[in-house]
Amino acid sequence: MGGTQTHSNQTNPATAAPSLELSTRGSTVLFLRMWAIAQIVHLWAAGGGMLTTPWAWGTVLAASAVLFRPTSRSFVGAMAAFQVLDYVWEMPFSPDHWVLAMAVNLLLLSVVVRRRADLLDGVASTLPAIRLVLLLAYGLAAIAKHNADFYNPVKSCAGALLSAASGGLVKGIALSTIAVVISVVVETSVPILLALPRARRFGVALAMIFHFGLSASPLFAVVDFTAILFPLFLLFLPNDDIEQIRLRLRDLSGKSQIARDIKRFPVPTVVLAVALIGVVGFAASVVSQASAWVIIEAYLFVVLFATITTIVKGRGVTATPRAFGRIRPAQLVVPLLLVVWGLSPYLGLRTTGVLSMFSNLQTEAAGNHFFMPTIRLAGWQDEIILVSEANDDRVQALADVDAGIPLMALRRYHGENPDLQVTGTIGGETVSFGGDGSPWEELSWWESKFLLFRPFAAGETRFCPIA
Protein backbone atom coordinates (compact mmCIF):
# COMPACT_ATOMS: atom_id res chain seq x y z
CA MET A 1 0.00 0.00 0.00
CA GLY A 2 2.92 2.31 0.53
CA GLY A 3 4.53 1.59 -2.90
CA THR A 4 5.18 4.16 -5.62
CA GLN A 5 2.38 4.64 -8.14
CA THR A 6 3.38 3.98 -11.75
CA HIS A 7 0.27 5.32 -13.49
CA SER A 8 -1.13 8.80 -13.05
CA ASN A 9 -4.72 7.58 -12.95
CA GLN A 10 -4.07 5.19 -10.09
CA THR A 11 -5.09 6.30 -6.60
CA ASN A 12 -2.62 6.50 -3.77
CA PRO A 13 -4.47 5.66 -0.56
CA ALA A 14 -2.35 8.14 1.29
CA THR A 15 -3.64 10.99 -0.87
CA ALA A 16 -7.07 9.67 -1.79
CA ALA A 17 -10.02 12.03 -1.53
CA PRO A 18 -11.91 11.64 1.74
CA SER A 19 -15.15 9.67 1.65
CA LEU A 20 -17.10 12.79 2.57
CA GLU A 21 -17.57 15.50 0.00
CA LEU A 22 -15.60 18.67 0.70
CA SER A 23 -18.57 20.78 1.83
CA THR A 24 -19.67 18.09 4.29
CA ARG A 25 -16.17 17.84 5.76
CA GLY A 26 -16.05 21.61 6.09
CA SER A 27 -19.41 21.58 7.86
CA THR A 28 -18.22 18.89 10.27
CA VAL A 29 -15.01 20.78 11.03
CA LEU A 30 -17.03 23.96 11.69
CA PHE A 31 -19.28 22.05 14.08
CA LEU A 32 -16.33 20.60 16.01
CA ARG A 33 -14.65 23.99 16.33
CA MET A 34 -17.85 25.70 17.46
CA TRP A 35 -18.52 22.83 19.85
CA ALA A 36 -15.05 23.25 21.33
CA ILE A 37 -15.71 26.96 21.81
CA ALA A 38 -18.98 26.10 23.56
CA GLN A 39 -17.17 23.97 26.14
CA ILE A 40 -14.71 26.79 26.81
CA VAL A 41 -17.46 29.40 27.00
CA HIS A 42 -19.42 27.45 29.59
CA LEU A 43 -16.46 26.92 31.91
CA TRP A 44 -15.35 30.52 31.49
CA ALA A 45 -18.78 32.01 32.16
CA ALA A 46 -19.78 29.57 34.90
CA GLY A 47 -16.44 29.68 36.67
CA GLY A 48 -15.94 33.44 36.51
CA GLY A 49 -12.39 32.96 35.26
CA MET A 50 -11.56 30.40 37.94
CA LEU A 51 -11.00 26.76 36.96
CA THR A 52 -10.79 24.71 40.14
CA THR A 53 -10.89 21.06 39.05
CA PRO A 54 -8.65 18.94 36.81
CA TRP A 55 -11.74 18.07 34.72
CA ALA A 56 -12.44 21.72 33.97
CA TRP A 57 -8.80 22.36 33.11
CA GLY A 58 -8.72 19.24 30.95
CA THR A 59 -11.87 20.30 29.08
CA VAL A 60 -10.54 23.79 28.35
CA LEU A 61 -7.09 22.59 27.26
CA ALA A 62 -8.46 19.79 25.07
CA ALA A 63 -11.09 22.10 23.54
CA SER A 64 -8.37 24.65 22.79
CA ALA A 65 -6.42 21.93 20.99
CA VAL A 66 -9.53 20.97 18.98
CA LEU A 67 -9.78 24.55 17.71
CA PHE A 68 -6.41 24.16 16.02
CA ARG A 69 -6.68 20.46 15.11
CA PRO A 70 -10.36 19.52 14.80
CA THR A 71 -9.49 16.32 12.92
CA SER A 72 -7.50 14.91 15.85
CA ARG A 73 -9.19 11.88 17.37
CA SER A 74 -7.16 12.28 20.57
CA PHE A 75 -8.09 15.94 21.07
CA VAL A 76 -11.81 15.44 20.33
CA GLY A 77 -11.92 12.37 22.56
CA ALA A 78 -10.14 14.15 25.41
CA MET A 79 -12.46 17.16 25.17
CA ALA A 80 -15.56 14.96 25.27
CA ALA A 81 -14.25 12.74 28.07
CA PHE A 82 -13.16 15.63 30.30
CA GLN A 83 -16.54 17.36 29.87
CA VAL A 84 -18.39 14.20 30.91
CA LEU A 85 -16.10 13.87 33.93
CA ASP A 86 -16.68 17.54 34.78
CA TYR A 87 -20.44 16.99 34.68
CA VAL A 88 -20.22 13.94 36.93
CA TRP A 89 -17.87 15.75 39.32
CA GLU A 90 -20.29 18.68 39.66
CA MET A 91 -23.35 16.49 40.25
CA PRO A 92 -25.95 17.11 41.50
CA PHE A 93 -25.42 20.81 40.75
CA SER A 94 -24.54 20.47 37.04
CA PRO A 95 -26.76 22.90 35.07
CA ASP A 96 -29.37 21.95 32.49
CA HIS A 97 -27.39 22.84 29.36
CA TRP A 98 -24.35 20.95 30.69
CA VAL A 99 -26.37 17.71 30.56
CA LEU A 100 -27.19 18.55 26.93
CA ALA A 101 -23.46 19.01 26.32
CA MET A 102 -22.74 15.71 28.03
CA ALA A 103 -25.25 13.87 25.83
CA VAL A 104 -23.57 15.22 22.70
CA ASN A 105 -20.11 14.42 24.05
CA LEU A 106 -21.13 10.85 24.86
CA LEU A 107 -22.08 10.45 21.19
CA LEU A 108 -18.75 11.95 20.13
CA LEU A 109 -16.96 9.52 22.45
CA SER A 110 -18.77 6.65 20.73
CA VAL A 111 -17.13 7.82 17.49
CA VAL A 112 -13.68 8.01 19.05
CA VAL A 113 -13.80 4.54 20.61
CA ARG A 114 -15.04 2.96 17.35
CA ARG A 115 -11.74 4.12 15.80
CA ARG A 116 -13.03 4.56 12.30
CA ALA A 117 -10.35 5.36 9.73
CA ASP A 118 -11.50 8.96 9.42
CA LEU A 119 -12.77 10.94 12.42
CA LEU A 120 -14.87 13.31 10.33
CA ASP A 121 -16.68 10.38 8.71
CA GLY A 122 -17.52 9.08 12.15
CA VAL A 123 -18.68 12.44 13.48
CA ALA A 124 -20.83 13.00 10.38
CA SER A 125 -22.48 9.61 10.94
CA THR A 126 -23.32 10.64 14.50
CA LEU A 127 -24.89 14.01 13.62
CA PRO A 128 -28.41 12.56 13.15
CA ALA A 129 -28.35 11.32 16.75
CA ILE A 130 -27.03 14.70 17.90
CA ARG A 131 -29.90 16.41 16.07
CA LEU A 132 -32.34 14.14 17.88
CA VAL A 133 -30.71 14.99 21.22
CA LEU A 134 -31.17 18.70 20.54
CA LEU A 135 -34.82 18.27 19.55
CA LEU A 136 -35.59 16.19 22.64
CA ALA A 137 -33.77 18.49 25.07
CA TYR A 138 -35.30 21.64 23.60
CA GLY A 139 -38.72 20.02 23.39
CA LEU A 140 -38.62 18.95 27.04
CA ALA A 141 -37.60 22.46 28.11
CA ALA A 142 -40.45 23.96 26.05
CA ILE A 143 -43.02 21.49 27.40
CA ALA A 144 -42.06 22.34 30.99
CA LYS A 145 -43.17 25.94 30.44
CA HIS A 146 -46.76 24.98 29.65
CA ASN A 147 -47.93 25.39 33.22
CA ALA A 148 -50.25 27.72 35.10
CA ASP A 149 -47.52 29.68 36.89
CA PHE A 150 -45.40 30.37 33.81
CA TYR A 151 -48.51 31.59 31.98
CA ASN A 152 -49.34 33.85 34.92
CA PRO A 153 -47.64 37.23 34.25
CA VAL A 154 -47.56 37.98 37.97
CA LYS A 155 -45.62 34.83 38.88
CA SER A 156 -43.90 33.91 35.60
CA CYS A 157 -40.13 33.51 35.33
CA ALA A 158 -40.41 35.23 31.94
CA GLY A 159 -41.28 38.53 33.64
CA ALA A 160 -38.74 37.98 36.39
CA LEU A 161 -35.92 37.39 33.90
CA LEU A 162 -36.96 40.41 31.83
CA SER A 163 -36.78 42.57 34.93
CA ALA A 164 -33.43 41.11 35.97
CA ALA A 165 -31.91 41.55 32.50
CA SER A 166 -32.98 45.21 32.40
CA GLY A 167 -31.81 46.01 35.91
CA GLY A 168 -35.42 46.46 37.01
CA LEU A 169 -36.16 49.09 34.36
CA VAL A 170 -38.50 46.86 32.36
CA LYS A 171 -41.31 45.46 34.47
CA GLY A 172 -45.04 45.48 34.91
CA ILE A 173 -47.92 43.15 34.06
CA ALA A 174 -48.19 44.24 30.41
CA LEU A 175 -44.51 43.70 29.61
CA SER A 176 -44.44 40.47 31.61
CA THR A 177 -47.38 39.22 29.56
CA ILE A 178 -45.55 40.01 26.33
CA ALA A 179 -42.47 38.16 27.63
CA VAL A 180 -44.60 35.12 28.48
CA VAL A 181 -46.24 35.04 25.04
CA ILE A 182 -42.95 35.42 23.16
CA SER A 183 -41.24 32.76 25.25
CA VAL A 184 -44.05 30.22 24.93
CA VAL A 185 -44.60 30.77 21.20
CA VAL A 186 -40.93 30.76 20.22
CA GLU A 187 -39.77 27.90 22.43
CA THR A 188 -42.72 25.74 21.40
CA SER A 189 -42.23 26.54 17.72
CA VAL A 190 -38.48 25.95 17.48
CA PRO A 191 -38.40 22.12 17.83
CA ILE A 192 -41.43 21.83 15.53
CA LEU A 193 -39.82 24.01 12.84
CA LEU A 194 -36.53 22.15 13.10
CA ALA A 195 -38.34 18.85 12.70
CA LEU A 196 -40.03 20.00 9.46
CA PRO A 197 -37.61 19.83 6.49
CA ARG A 198 -39.01 22.84 4.61
CA ALA A 199 -39.17 25.00 7.77
CA ARG A 200 -35.68 24.32 9.12
CA ARG A 201 -34.04 27.45 7.76
CA PHE A 202 -36.66 29.65 9.40
CA GLY A 203 -36.46 27.58 12.59
CA VAL A 204 -32.69 28.04 12.82
CA ALA A 205 -32.95 31.80 12.25
CA LEU A 206 -35.75 32.20 14.81
CA ALA A 207 -33.95 30.10 17.42
CA MET A 208 -30.61 31.86 17.04
CA ILE A 209 -32.10 35.37 17.16
CA PHE A 210 -34.18 34.46 20.21
CA HIS A 211 -31.30 32.96 22.17
CA PHE A 212 -28.89 35.71 21.22
CA GLY A 213 -31.44 38.13 22.64
CA LEU A 214 -31.60 36.15 25.88
CA SER A 215 -27.83 36.40 26.29
CA ALA A 216 -27.54 40.08 25.32
CA SER A 217 -27.74 41.63 28.77
CA PRO A 218 -24.61 41.60 30.94
CA LEU A 219 -26.89 41.74 34.01
CA PHE A 220 -28.42 38.37 33.26
CA ALA A 221 -26.44 36.80 30.45
CA VAL A 222 -26.87 33.12 29.65
CA VAL A 223 -24.08 33.19 27.10
CA ASP A 224 -22.95 29.67 27.95
CA PHE A 225 -26.37 28.21 27.10
CA THR A 226 -26.48 30.16 23.83
CA ALA A 227 -22.96 29.03 22.92
CA ILE A 228 -24.00 25.39 23.44
CA LEU A 229 -27.09 25.80 21.25
CA PHE A 230 -25.58 27.68 18.27
CA PRO A 231 -23.50 24.81 16.79
CA LEU A 232 -26.41 22.41 17.34
CA PHE A 233 -28.85 24.69 15.53
CA LEU A 234 -26.54 24.91 12.52
CA LEU A 235 -26.73 21.13 12.10
CA PHE A 236 -30.27 21.58 10.74
CA LEU A 237 -29.14 23.71 7.79
CA PRO A 238 -28.21 22.27 4.37
CA ASN A 239 -24.50 21.63 3.85
CA ASP A 240 -24.34 24.41 1.27
CA ASP A 241 -25.62 26.91 3.84
CA ILE A 242 -23.14 25.75 6.46
CA GLU A 243 -20.32 25.98 3.94
CA GLN A 244 -21.34 29.56 3.14
CA ILE A 245 -21.42 30.35 6.86
CA ARG A 246 -17.96 28.84 7.25
CA LEU A 247 -16.63 30.94 4.38
CA ARG A 248 -18.22 34.09 5.78
CA LEU A 249 -16.70 33.43 9.18
CA ARG A 250 -13.33 32.86 7.52
CA ASP A 251 -13.64 36.12 5.59
CA LEU A 252 -14.70 38.04 8.70
CA SER A 253 -11.81 36.63 10.72
CA GLY A 254 -9.43 37.39 7.87
CA LYS A 255 -10.27 41.09 8.20
CA SER A 256 -9.36 41.08 11.88
CA GLN A 257 -5.74 41.68 12.86
CA ILE A 258 -6.41 39.89 16.14
CA ALA A 259 -7.66 36.79 14.32
CA ARG A 260 -4.62 36.84 12.02
CA ASP A 261 -2.28 37.09 15.00
CA ILE A 262 -4.03 34.15 16.67
CA LYS A 263 -3.37 32.02 13.60
CA ARG A 264 0.26 33.14 13.46
CA PHE A 265 0.94 32.58 17.16
CA PRO A 266 -1.31 29.73 18.31
CA VAL A 267 0.72 28.63 21.35
CA PRO A 268 1.03 32.09 23.00
CA THR A 269 -2.66 32.65 22.20
CA VAL A 270 -3.70 29.46 23.97
CA VAL A 271 -1.51 30.30 26.99
CA LEU A 272 -3.01 33.80 27.32
CA ALA A 273 -6.55 32.57 26.73
CA VAL A 274 -6.29 29.76 29.27
CA ALA A 275 -4.87 32.21 31.81
CA LEU A 276 -7.81 34.56 31.26
CA ILE A 277 -10.32 31.72 31.39
CA GLY A 278 -8.92 29.81 34.31
CA VAL A 279 -6.64 31.99 36.43
CA VAL A 280 -7.47 35.72 36.21
CA GLY A 281 -10.72 35.28 38.09
CA PHE A 282 -8.84 34.39 41.27
CA ALA A 283 -7.25 37.85 41.31
CA ALA A 284 -9.86 39.95 39.49
CA SER A 285 -13.21 38.22 39.09
CA VAL A 286 -14.97 41.33 37.77
CA VAL A 287 -12.35 41.78 35.05
CA SER A 288 -12.65 38.16 33.99
CA GLN A 289 -16.45 38.22 33.94
CA ALA A 290 -16.64 41.50 32.05
CA SER A 291 -14.12 40.39 29.45
CA ALA A 292 -15.93 37.06 29.15
CA TRP A 293 -19.23 38.74 28.34
CA VAL A 294 -17.71 41.12 25.78
CA ILE A 295 -15.65 38.47 23.96
CA ILE A 296 -18.36 35.81 24.01
CA GLU A 297 -21.10 38.19 22.88
CA ALA A 298 -18.87 39.38 20.03
CA TYR A 299 -18.33 35.77 18.96
CA LEU A 300 -22.05 34.96 19.15
CA PHE A 301 -22.93 38.08 17.16
CA VAL A 302 -20.48 37.22 14.39
CA VAL A 303 -21.89 33.69 14.12
CA LEU A 304 -25.45 35.04 14.15
CA PHE A 305 -24.61 37.63 11.47
CA ALA A 306 -22.97 35.05 9.22
CA THR A 307 -25.92 32.68 9.64
CA ILE A 308 -28.71 35.19 9.09
CA THR A 309 -27.03 36.75 6.03
CA THR A 310 -26.58 33.27 4.55
CA ILE A 311 -30.21 32.36 5.15
CA VAL A 312 -31.52 35.69 3.81
CA LYS A 313 -29.36 35.56 0.67
CA GLY A 314 -30.43 31.97 0.05
CA ARG A 315 -34.10 32.70 0.64
CA GLY A 316 -35.02 32.67 -3.03
CA VAL A 317 -32.78 29.72 -3.84
CA THR A 318 -34.36 26.29 -3.83
CA ALA A 319 -32.07 24.19 -1.68
CA THR A 320 -32.47 20.57 -0.77
CA PRO A 321 -33.60 20.55 2.87
CA ARG A 322 -31.24 19.00 5.34
CA ALA A 323 -32.04 15.30 5.65
CA PHE A 324 -32.33 14.28 9.29
CA GLY A 325 -30.20 11.20 8.65
CA ARG A 326 -30.28 7.62 9.85
CA ILE A 327 -29.69 6.87 13.51
CA ARG A 328 -28.10 3.56 14.41
CA PRO A 329 -29.96 1.60 17.12
CA ALA A 330 -26.96 1.75 19.48
CA GLN A 331 -26.97 5.54 19.26
CA LEU A 332 -30.54 5.69 20.63
CA VAL A 333 -29.30 4.86 24.13
CA VAL A 334 -28.15 8.43 24.77
CA PRO A 335 -31.38 10.14 23.59
CA LEU A 336 -33.47 7.67 25.60
CA LEU A 337 -31.47 8.34 28.77
CA LEU A 338 -31.84 12.07 28.14
CA VAL A 339 -35.63 11.70 27.91
CA VAL A 340 -35.75 9.79 31.21
CA TRP A 341 -33.61 12.50 32.81
CA GLY A 342 -35.88 15.25 31.44
CA LEU A 343 -38.99 13.45 32.70
CA SER A 344 -37.60 13.20 36.25
CA PRO A 345 -39.94 15.85 37.76
CA TYR A 346 -43.01 14.11 36.35
CA LEU A 347 -41.80 10.77 37.76
CA GLY A 348 -41.47 12.08 41.31
CA LEU A 349 -37.67 12.29 41.08
CA ARG A 350 -35.32 15.30 41.13
CA THR A 351 -36.60 18.68 39.91
CA THR A 352 -33.41 20.66 39.28
CA GLY A 353 -30.98 20.46 36.35
CA VAL A 354 -33.44 18.35 34.35
CA LEU A 355 -34.16 20.59 31.32
CA SER A 356 -36.88 22.59 33.06
CA MET A 357 -34.91 25.76 33.81
CA PHE A 358 -36.82 29.01 34.38
CA SER A 359 -40.10 27.20 33.77
CA ASN A 360 -42.05 27.67 37.04
CA LEU A 361 -42.76 23.95 36.74
CA GLN A 362 -44.24 22.43 39.86
CA THR A 363 -44.82 18.69 40.07
CA GLU A 364 -45.03 18.64 43.85
CA ALA A 365 -48.43 18.54 45.57
CA ALA A 366 -51.21 19.05 43.01
CA GLY A 367 -48.76 20.27 40.35
CA ASN A 368 -49.32 23.07 37.87
CA HIS A 369 -48.71 21.57 34.42
CA PHE A 370 -51.53 21.77 31.90
CA PHE A 371 -51.23 18.32 30.37
CA MET A 372 -48.22 16.32 31.62
CA PRO A 373 -49.27 13.61 34.09
CA THR A 374 -47.20 12.88 37.18
CA ILE A 375 -46.23 9.43 38.43
CA ARG A 376 -44.64 8.97 41.83
CA LEU A 377 -41.79 6.48 41.57
CA ALA A 378 -40.60 7.79 44.94
CA GLY A 379 -42.06 9.93 47.73
CA TRP A 380 -39.40 12.66 47.69
CA GLN A 381 -41.80 15.27 46.28
CA ASP A 382 -44.60 14.42 48.73
CA GLU A 383 -43.10 15.85 51.93
CA ILE A 384 -43.39 19.57 51.30
CA ILE A 385 -42.61 22.04 54.05
CA LEU A 386 -43.87 25.62 54.11
CA VAL A 387 -41.17 27.41 56.11
CA SER A 388 -42.29 29.94 58.69
CA GLU A 389 -39.02 30.48 60.55
CA ALA A 390 -35.39 29.46 60.13
CA ASN A 391 -31.98 30.44 61.49
CA ASP A 392 -30.49 30.36 58.00
CA ASP A 393 -30.98 33.41 55.75
CA ARG A 394 -31.27 31.27 52.63
CA VAL A 395 -34.08 29.18 54.12
CA GLN A 396 -35.78 32.15 55.80
CA ALA A 397 -35.95 33.81 52.39
CA LEU A 398 -38.32 31.03 51.31
CA ALA A 399 -40.77 32.06 54.03
CA ASP A 400 -40.61 35.66 52.84
CA VAL A 401 -41.85 34.68 49.35
CA ASP A 402 -44.34 31.96 50.38
CA ALA A 403 -42.26 29.22 48.76
CA GLY A 404 -42.61 25.53 49.43
CA ILE A 405 -39.68 23.15 49.41
CA PRO A 406 -39.31 19.37 49.64
CA LEU A 407 -37.97 18.22 52.99
CA MET A 408 -35.28 16.35 51.05
CA ALA A 409 -33.87 19.73 49.93
CA LEU A 410 -33.71 20.98 53.51
CA ARG A 411 -31.83 17.84 54.47
CA ARG A 412 -29.19 18.91 51.92
CA TYR A 413 -29.10 22.41 53.43
CA HIS A 414 -28.54 20.79 56.83
CA GLY A 415 -25.54 18.96 55.40
CA GLU A 416 -24.08 22.36 54.52
CA ASN A 417 -25.19 23.98 57.81
CA PRO A 418 -25.21 21.46 60.69
CA ASP A 419 -26.81 24.06 63.02
CA LEU A 420 -29.84 24.54 60.76
CA GLN A 421 -33.14 24.94 62.60
CA VAL A 422 -36.42 25.19 60.70
CA THR A 423 -40.06 25.56 61.75
CA GLY A 424 -42.90 25.24 59.31
CA THR A 425 -45.89 23.17 58.28
CA ILE A 426 -46.19 19.88 56.45
CA GLY A 427 -49.70 18.96 55.38
CA GLY A 428 -51.12 21.61 57.71
CA GLU A 429 -49.26 20.30 60.79
CA THR A 430 -46.58 22.38 62.50
CA VAL A 431 -43.15 20.74 62.49
CA SER A 432 -39.70 21.68 63.71
CA PHE A 433 -36.31 20.28 62.75
CA GLY A 434 -32.96 20.82 64.41
CA GLY A 435 -32.33 22.25 67.88
CA ASP A 436 -35.14 21.06 70.16
CA GLY A 437 -37.13 19.76 67.19
CA SER A 438 -36.91 16.50 65.29
CA PRO A 439 -33.36 15.47 64.33
CA TRP A 440 -32.31 15.83 60.72
CA GLU A 441 -31.85 12.68 58.70
CA GLU A 442 -28.52 12.65 56.90
CA LEU A 443 -28.47 12.16 53.14
CA SER A 444 -26.87 8.95 51.91
CA TRP A 445 -23.98 9.31 49.47
CA TRP A 446 -26.14 8.50 46.46
CA GLU A 447 -28.93 10.87 47.59
CA SER A 448 -26.34 13.59 47.97
CA LYS A 449 -24.89 12.89 44.51
CA PHE A 450 -28.04 12.41 42.45
CA LEU A 451 -31.00 14.15 44.10
CA LEU A 452 -31.61 17.89 43.91
CA PHE A 453 -34.90 19.68 44.51
CA ARG A 454 -35.78 23.31 44.06
CA PRO A 455 -38.29 25.40 46.00
CA PHE A 456 -41.46 26.49 44.24
CA ALA A 457 -44.08 29.22 44.56
CA ALA A 458 -46.72 28.03 47.00
CA GLY A 459 -48.49 31.40 47.23
CA GLU A 460 -49.15 34.32 44.90
CA THR A 461 -45.75 36.00 45.35
CA ARG A 462 -43.50 35.88 42.29
CA PHE A 463 -40.76 33.37 42.84
CA CYS A 464 -38.52 32.14 40.05
CA PRO A 465 -36.05 29.42 41.04
CA ILE A 466 -33.01 29.55 38.77
CA ALA A 467 -32.77 25.92 37.73
Image (cartoon, grey):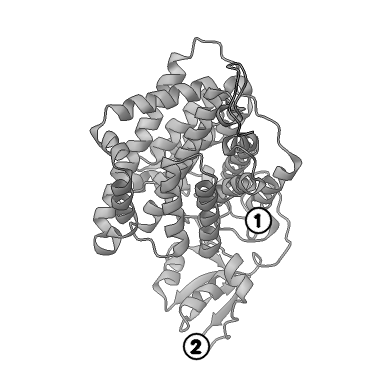
Residue 409 versus residue 195 in the image, above or below: below
Amino acid at pointer 2:
Gly
Give the percent coordinates (x, y) of residue 2. Answer: 60, 34
Residue 357 has which mark?
A: none
Query: Sequence order check: which comes first, mark 2 or mark 1?
Result: 1
Residue 48 versus residue 336 in the image, above or below: below
Q: Which residue is mark 2?
A: 435
Viewer-proximal residue among 269 and 4? 4
Q: Is residue 259 visible?
A: yes
Q: Secondary structure at mark 2?
A: loop
Q: Is residue 96 visible?
A: no
Give the percent coordinates (x, y) of residue 149. Answer: 54, 48
Q: Secondary structure at mark 1?
A: helix
Amino acid at pointer 1:
Ser
Q: Quadrant of the N terminus?
A: top right
Viewer-proximal residue among 167 and 104? 104
Locate residue 20 relative to residue 82 in the image: left or right: right
Give the percent coordinates (x, y) of residue 198. Answer: 60, 19
- Residue at 45% x, 77% y: name it: 390
Whole-number angstrom distance, CA of label 2 to CA of label 1: 33 Å
Locate residue 310 relative to residue 319 in the image: left or right: left
Locate residue 401 relative to residue 267 in the image: left or right: right
Front position among marks 2 and 1:
1
**Residue positioned most to the bottom:** 436
Which image quadrant is residue 246 in?
top left
Viewer-proximal residue among 448 and 64? 64
Q: Which residue is mark 1?
A: 344
Label 1: how many residues lie within 10 Å, few (<14), some (14-19) or many (20+)? many
